[in-house]
Amino acid sequence: MSKFKIDKIFKKAKETLTENEKVKGLISEVKDKVEEINSDSDERTTFIYQLQVIIRMVRAHINGSYRAFSATTILTLVFALVYFITPIDLIPDFIPALGLTDDISLVYFIFKSLADDIAKFRVWEEANA
């Protein structure tokens, strides 16, 4: 993926974060796309789980119930969601068996990179369930 494409997605993520309604629209688009994914493998099941956690994290941030994320963390989470719904990927999503590979790889990388933030959020989430 070109630097131009990544910069464009980061710009879109920053722009999305300026209004809660934009973030809610993004979350809705991601949820719709997640419903289209066939979770026929452990890899896809894990990917869907990770996306659902990211959605909950972003939602908790924008509704003000969880504000422990740094600006970089929340931007990275929104970047992952924007990348996921962006129709032009490194590997187009319509290619059977390979289409989600870049999406899965990116979300996996972000999940590993933000492991501490995610763990703290999950503890908070369980305590407030």
Image (cartoon, grey):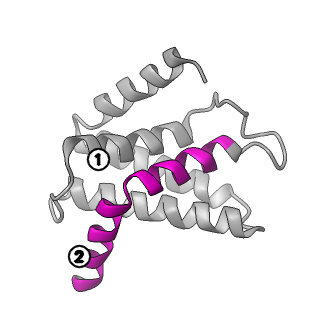
N-terminal of the pair, mark 1 or mark 2, is: 1
Q: Position of residue 58 (x, y in %)?
A: 31, 54
Q: Position of residue 55 (x, y in %)?
A: 40, 58
Residue at 60% across / 51% down in the picture?
33
Left/right placement of residue 93 relative to residue 63 reads: right
Q: Name the amino acid, label 2.
A: Trp
The residue to which callout 2 is attached is 124
Quadrant of res 102? top right
Left/right placement of residue 75 relative to residue 106 reads: left
Whether residues under marks 1 and 2 lie with C-beta atoms below 8 angstroms apart, the answer is no
Above or below: residue 63 compared with residue 119 = above
Residue 120 in the magenta stretch? The answer is yes
Where is the N terminus found, in terms of image quarters? Answer: top right
Residue at 18% across / 63% down in the picture?
66
**Residue bounds of the magenta highlight:** 102-127
The residue to which callout 1 is attached is 73
Separation of residues labelled 1 and 2 (CA atoms): 16 Å
Q: Position of residue 99 (x, y in %)?
A: 75, 42
